[in-house]
Image: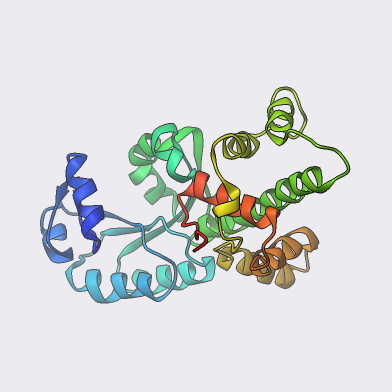
Amino acid sequence: MVTYDVSQSAITSAVGQGLEVVKDYKEMLENIDCPRNIWMMIPAGKAVDDVIFNDLLPYLVEGDLLIDGGNSNYKDSIKRAQKLAARKIEFMDVGTSGGICGVHNGLSLMIGGSKDNFKRIEPALKDLAAEKGYHLMGGNGAGHFVKMVHNGIEYTLLQSYAEGFELLREGPFELDLRAIASVWNNGGIVRSWLLGLIQEILEKDKLDIIDAEVGGGQTGSWAVEAAMEAEVPFTMLAAALSNRFHSRRDSFAAKLVAALRMRFGGHTVKRKR
């Protein structure tokens, strides 16, 4: 496998894992046999367009396949697929979930694109995904649409757990939050992987040194917009998104959400100075 990244730390990590790292996009493509499958993991927005249409397109040939595994807006994915199709370049969008643990346990992959291209990359999908953890959701844009909704649900789950534990903490009893998380995680209806992470956080992390500001919010905003367009109720998601934007207040709930995002996704947590 040939790879390239603009980050020196990512390059060092890739070399340590036995990957062949090249100096630029041109050299990367020269070292892959045609037709080529190129998987991109790039932050959503202009950066994706820059890589596709400025860095890669001059070296692509008919039949090459670009795969966007980042958190792009599904509408952007539809537009990119159409623009590339005019140049006879294939495109697929892959919503990727599983966080940093997914590297070892397998990812959840939500794919958008043609059936032929799905079959073309299915061996790679099998290697990357957890058992039964990948599926062709529909045409271009469908993978990122499903991932957007996934993230919206994630927002509400995080907020529900965080508010519940803040109520336990501030209520009329002196409660052991770690013990509660353990009890709930063993037979409780609300048991989950996220609750297991909460248990780890309560046992190991010092929330009092974490800044309450919770990052993210982009995919949640897109989900609210999509719900408005489809005239679908979105009260829980809107509330969770609002609380994320309001997270600059120094609350236990916001700290817990921030710590959870660090645990499952490796997202940066601000520390108090």
Looking at the image, the residue that sits furthest to the top is: 187
Residue 227 visible in the snapshot: yes
Residue at 60% in and 52% down: 208
Nearest the eye: 88 or 48: 48
Residue 189: % across, % down = 77, 31
Name the foreground residue: 182 vs 108.
182
Question: Where does the image place residue 69, in percent across and percent down from the top left?
Answer: 41, 55
* Left or right of 264 in this view: 172: right
Position of residue 128 in the picture relative to residue 262 (left or right): left
Examine the rendered structure and indicate whether residue 94 appears above or below residue 202.
below
Position of residue 126 in the picture relative to residue 144 (left or right) = left
Query: Residue 85, percent across and down?
Result: 36, 69
Residue shown at the point (30%, 65%) measured from the top left: 89
Task: Using the image, determine if residue 99 lies above or below residue 242.
Answer: above
Q: Residue at x 73, y 33 (%)?
A: 176
Residue 104, by quadrant, is: top left
Instruction: Please give left or right for residue 251 compared with residue 201 in the image.
Output: right
Is 82 located above or below residue 101 in the figure?
Answer: below
